[in-house]
Protein backbone atom coordinates (compact mmCIF):
# COMPACT_ATOMS: atom_id res chain seq x y z
CA UNK A 1 0.00 0.00 0.00
CA UNK A 2 1.33 3.46 -0.91
CA UNK A 3 0.53 6.09 1.74
CA UNK A 4 0.40 9.77 0.82
CA UNK A 5 1.66 11.74 3.81
CA UNK A 6 -0.75 14.27 5.23
CA UNK A 7 -3.77 12.96 3.31
CA UNK A 8 -6.26 11.41 5.70
CA UNK A 9 -5.84 8.76 8.32
CA UNK A 10 -5.16 5.04 8.36
CA UNK A 11 -7.59 2.95 10.39
CA UNK A 12 -6.00 0.08 12.30
CA UNK A 13 -8.25 -2.59 13.76
CA UNK A 14 -7.47 -3.96 17.20
CA UNK A 15 -4.13 -5.83 17.25
CA UNK A 16 -3.56 -5.26 13.52
CA UNK A 17 -0.21 -3.92 12.42
CA UNK A 18 1.30 -1.85 9.66
CA UNK A 19 4.90 -2.05 8.42
CA UNK A 20 6.68 0.91 6.86
CA UNK A 21 10.03 1.40 5.22
CA UNK A 22 11.77 4.59 4.07
CA UNK A 23 9.95 6.58 6.75
CA UNK A 24 12.87 8.65 8.07
CA UNK A 25 11.77 12.18 8.96
CA UNK A 26 8.08 11.27 8.92
CA UNK A 27 5.86 12.18 11.85
CA UNK A 28 3.50 9.46 13.08
CA UNK A 29 0.48 10.98 14.86
CA UNK A 30 -2.04 8.92 16.82
CA UNK A 31 -5.48 10.51 16.38
CA UNK A 32 -7.56 7.84 18.11
CA UNK A 33 -6.84 4.89 20.40
CA UNK A 34 -3.36 3.75 21.41
CA UNK A 35 -0.50 2.80 19.09
CA UNK A 36 2.58 0.72 19.82
CA UNK A 37 5.58 1.34 17.56
CA UNK A 38 8.97 -0.22 17.16
CA UNK A 39 11.58 1.28 14.87
CA UNK A 40 14.67 -0.67 13.83
CA UNK A 41 17.63 1.47 14.90
CA UNK A 42 15.81 3.43 17.63
CA UNK A 43 16.24 2.39 21.27
CA UNK A 44 13.09 1.09 22.94
CA UNK A 45 9.50 0.91 21.80
CA UNK A 46 7.14 3.87 21.54
CA UNK A 47 3.56 4.02 22.79
CA UNK A 48 1.37 6.85 21.52
CA UNK A 49 -2.04 7.82 22.87
CA UNK A 50 -4.52 9.97 20.94
CA UNK A 51 -3.00 13.39 20.29
CA UNK A 52 0.62 12.25 20.66
CA UNK A 53 3.18 12.01 17.87
CA UNK A 54 6.67 10.70 17.17
CA UNK A 55 9.15 11.68 14.46
CA UNK A 56 11.04 8.77 12.89
CA UNK A 57 14.74 9.62 13.18
CA UNK A 58 16.33 6.64 11.42
CA UNK A 59 15.88 4.82 8.13
CA UNK A 60 14.95 1.48 9.74
CA UNK A 61 11.76 -0.53 9.37
CA UNK A 62 8.76 0.71 11.38
CA UNK A 63 6.05 -1.54 12.80
CA UNK A 64 2.90 0.11 14.17
CA UNK A 65 0.15 -1.80 15.95
CA UNK A 66 -3.08 -0.75 17.62
CA UNK A 67 -3.30 -1.73 21.28
CA UNK A 68 -6.53 -2.60 23.09
CA UNK A 69 -9.01 -1.13 20.62
CA UNK A 70 -9.13 0.17 17.08
CA UNK A 71 -6.88 3.16 16.39
CA UNK A 72 -6.30 5.82 13.77
CA UNK A 73 -2.93 7.10 12.64
CA UNK A 74 -1.92 10.03 10.45
CA UNK A 75 1.43 10.29 8.66
CA UNK A 76 2.87 13.76 8.17
CA UNK A 77 6.12 15.10 6.77
CA UNK A 78 8.41 16.56 9.44
CA UNK A 79 8.45 20.33 10.05
CA UNK A 80 11.73 20.68 8.16
CA UNK A 81 10.27 18.94 5.13
CA UNK A 82 7.14 21.12 5.25
CA UNK A 83 9.30 24.26 5.38
CA UNK A 84 11.43 23.01 2.47
CA UNK A 85 8.31 22.27 0.39
CA UNK A 86 6.81 25.69 1.15
CA UNK A 87 10.10 27.44 0.30
CA UNK A 88 10.39 25.48 -2.94
CA UNK A 89 6.82 26.40 -3.92
CA UNK A 90 7.48 30.07 -3.10
CA UNK A 91 10.69 30.11 -5.16
CA UNK A 92 8.89 28.48 -8.09
CA UNK A 93 6.20 31.16 -7.92
CA UNK A 94 8.83 33.91 -7.82
CA UNK A 95 10.64 32.40 -10.83
CA UNK A 96 7.40 32.38 -12.84
CA UNK A 97 6.70 36.01 -11.93
CA UNK A 98 10.22 37.10 -12.88
CA UNK A 99 10.00 35.18 -16.16
CA UNK A 100 6.68 36.92 -16.87
CA UNK A 101 8.17 40.34 -16.13
CA UNK A 102 11.21 39.56 -18.27
CA UNK A 103 8.94 38.54 -21.16
CA UNK A 104 6.85 41.73 -20.78
CA UNK A 105 10.00 43.89 -20.69
CA UNK A 106 11.27 42.24 -23.90
CA UNK A 107 7.99 43.05 -25.65
CA UNK A 108 8.19 46.70 -24.56
CA UNK A 109 11.73 47.10 -25.88
CA UNK A 110 11.10 45.26 -29.15
Image (cartoon, rainbow, N blue to C red):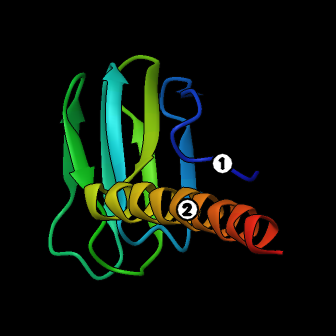
Q: Which mark is residue 3?
A: 1
Q: Is residue 86 left or right of residue 109?
A: left
Seen from this angle, which residue lies furthest front?
A: 109
Which residue is rendered at x = 34% and y = 22% of the image? 31
Q: Is residue 106 left or right of residue 60?
A: right
Reading the image, the residue beneath label 2 is: 20
**Neighbour tally class for label 1: few under 14, some 14-19, many 20 plus, Cα within 10 Å:** few
Q: Earlier in the sequence, mark 2 or mark 1?
A: 1
For the residues labelled 2 and 1, the Cα–Cα distance comes to 10 Å
Please provide percent x and percent y for residue 105.
Answer: 68, 67
Residue closest to the eye, 4 or 33: 4
Q: Are marks 2 and 1 in contact (CB under 8 Å)?
A: yes
How many dots with numbers? 2
Which residue is rendered at x = 47% and y = 73% of the image? 61
Which residue is rendered at x = 39% and y = 62% of the image? 87
Residue closest to the eye, 81 or 24: 81
Local SS, label 1: loop
Local SS, label 2: strand
Which residue is rendered at x = 34% and y = 51% of the image? 27
Amino acid sequence: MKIKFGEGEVYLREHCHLRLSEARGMVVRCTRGVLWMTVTGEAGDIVLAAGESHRIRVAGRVVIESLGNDARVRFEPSTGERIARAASAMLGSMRRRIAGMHSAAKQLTA
